Image (cartoon, rainbow, N blue to C red):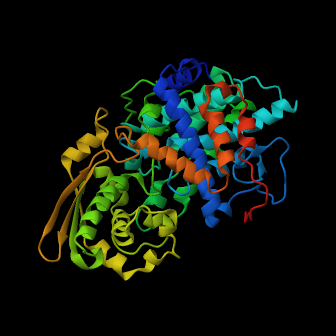
Amino acid sequence: MSSQEYDQVITDIKDYVFHYDITSCKAWNNARIALLDAIGCAIETVSKSEDCKRMFGPIVPGSTIPNGFRLPGTSYILDPLKGSFDMGTAIRYLDHNDAIAGADWGHPSDNLGAILAVSDWLCRSSEAGVIMHTGPPLTLKTILVALIKAYEIQGCMLLRNAFNAYGLDHVILVKLASTAIISWLLGLTEDQTMAAISQVWMDGHALRVYRQKGNTISRKGWAAGDACMKATQLALLTRAGQQGSPTPLTMPRWGFYANCFGDSHFDLPKKYTSWVIENVIFKIMPVEGHGISSVEAAMIHLKTLQARNLRAEIDISRIIIRTNAATDMIINKTGPLTNAADRDHCLQYLVALTFLKGALPEAADFLSSSVWSSSSSMDNLREKIEIFVDKQLTEDYMDLDVRSIAAGMTVHLADGRQLGEVLIQFPVGHGKNFKTQDVVREKIHKNMGLMFSQDEIDTILSMVEDKTNEEKTVSEFLDLLVREGSLSSKL
């Protein structure tokens, strides 16, 4: 390896991973909730999504990996790479896991795909005497530390850095954060960890074309799993002796900044601490996060319509939504929607669905088999929705002291009357909404109830929430989530 020093961005991440001590009580509390929420999202996917389940399981059907990762909600035993993919995909696929907003947008619990898969594999292999583990103890406390630090790396990187402006998908930061954390979990040295991180910036990166109108496909649901799998691979390759390059970001002509970031350097407004887990946004409905405030506003207007015996499909002539620029860029879609991935990333569909259904959106509402996907009432109401970017709401969205994901909705009626604007700045799920913690716990119970009895749920929750269980191994925890019986893998 070159004696040249690594890019400062790489060094700073390494120093944070190895040397920062987490002292915030709020961080620890939120980390426990985030872990359970992510597990619940994975269970929801395993229970509800046939499309996603077809991707699960070993690459070679019927094969078993000794001491492999136990994929929650299944009986699969997987190698760490496929385990990282399957777990990351299960957490993310239905768009129900947590989020953090900034110049870009991301879902930090995506990283748990790699964290849980690698930790469980290491734990079982170490207990079986197959490997000599040299990293941190493979306990629930270590998982929480890994979670907090992965959240922080991904979240701080996206606060002021718009990878989407260069066509890159935000899962590049899942690959970054997971690679750094997996290197630590594997017991790599600090130099090896920097080498692994350098590989991330030299790697090819996913384009966000699969999230954009005209090309939106289900890859957006497994992109995070793909990033987790790649992170695990890069860390393992480094463990096997592969070298890193010191300046993959800053090298003139050939580096990441020159080729992939418009010759700009990263803007990092915060030091790595535990800010992201303390400010993470939990999602209480399986929709693209920028649409949640509009859905809440629609629910309020819906109650007014119902009180007046009015019907949305007949009595609404126009819906005006003012929101931030990120919402407009990501989910303002007109015209035909071709699949579930397209629909759950369309603000007009989310709002029209809420008015027509009279309830919050659910994952099944976006399927092509849903009555709403081919409804003429849906098409008509979508056409009546107008979206405008508001300068102040955009500034508040980017302000780290405000962090709103606001939307204001005004409804015009066919008889000429108007329902005044309902402005939602901090929807349920946002840290500034006092209902968030209780509603997220309800969500966890609901999702876990899809596959587990109440006694089992109580045991699972206690394992994470009771601090006396912090020294229990990750494998003891994941054993609670196994469900016997095979799924139908089509790989």
| Quadrant of image for the N terminus | top right
Q: Residue at x 39, y 33 (%)?
A: 265
Position above or below: 48 against 90: below
Q: Position of residue 42 (x, y in %)?
A: 61, 51
Q: Nearer the viewer, residue 55 or 229?
A: 55
Q: Nearer the viewer, residue 366 or 186?
A: 366
Q: Position of residue 354 (x, y in %)?
A: 36, 66
Q: Residue at x 71, y 38 (%)?
A: 477
Res 479 quadrant in image: top right
Q: Residue furthest right?
A: 129
Q: Would residue 41 be seen by someone viewing this image from the given angle? A: no
| Quadrant of image for the C terminus | bottom right
Position above or below: 66 against 361: above
Q: Position of residue 328 (x, y in %)?
A: 30, 56
Position above or below: 15 against 231: above
Q: Quick check: 305 left or right of 283?
A: left
Position above or below: 270 against 315: above
Q: Position of residue 174 (x, y in %)?
A: 54, 41
Q: Residue at x 69, y 46 (%)?
A: 456
Q: Would residue 276 be seen by someone viewing this image from the given angle? A: yes
Q: Residue at x 59, y 30 (%)?
A: 144
